[in-house]
């Protein structure tokens, strides 16, 4: 089989030459975008620090976001669900496997019926 021809499959085609041309065009476009970039960047200066609206840079520990605060909206919206599910959480793997078996059996019964 010639590598420069199109390979027809049941759901499309594959032509390595077309893919190489597309890759080269994409790389040229990416280089042109990169070449138009800012030339005045200097590593190790004030340019690398984050802009915090003129406020002084906070201590490293002061910007830490706890997971409880990060997911507050999610857990608050599902609070009714969590109230019922948390007592069922035992931390024992065999309990979870039992739940998986019961749910799988229920789904199989619903699918068959």
Image: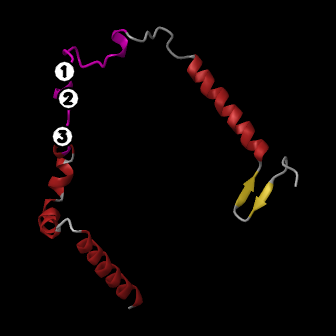
Viewer-side residue, 39 vs 45: 45
The quadrant in which the C terminus is found is: bottom left
User: Dividing the picture into quarters, in which one does residue 104 lie?
Assistant: bottom left
Viewer-side residue, 23 vs 45: 45
SS state under label 1: loop
Viewer-side residue, 101 vs 110: 101
The answer to whether the residue labelled 2 contacts the one labelled 1, judged by CB atoms less than 8 Å apart, is yes
Q: Which residue is mark 2?
A: 63
Prevailing secondary structure of the magenta residues:
loop
Residue 40 rendering spot, x and y as whole percentages: 47, 8
Region rendered in magenta = 45-67
Q: Which residue is mark 3?
A: 66
Above or below 88: residue 8: above
Q: Which residue is mark 1?
A: 58
Above or below 87: residue 99: below
Residue at image point 32% right, 16% down? 49
Instruction: Give the farthest residue toward the bottom.
Output: 113
- State which tag comes first along the sequence, 1 or 3: 1
């Amino acid at each position: 089989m010639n590598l420069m021809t199109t390979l027809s499959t049941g759901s499309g085609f594959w032509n390595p030459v077309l893919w190489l041309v597309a890759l080269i065009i994409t790389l040229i476009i990416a280089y042109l975008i990169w070449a138009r970039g800012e030339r005045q960047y200097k590593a190790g200066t004030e340019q690398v620090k984050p802009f915090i609206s003129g406020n002084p840079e906070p201590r490293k520990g002061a910007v830490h976001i706890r997971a409880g605060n990060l997911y507050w909206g999610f857990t608050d919206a599902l609070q009714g669900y969590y109230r019922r599910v948390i007592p069922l959480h035992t931390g024992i793997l065999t309990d979870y496997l039992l739940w998986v078996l019961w749910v799988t059996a229920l789904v199989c019964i619903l699918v068959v019926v």
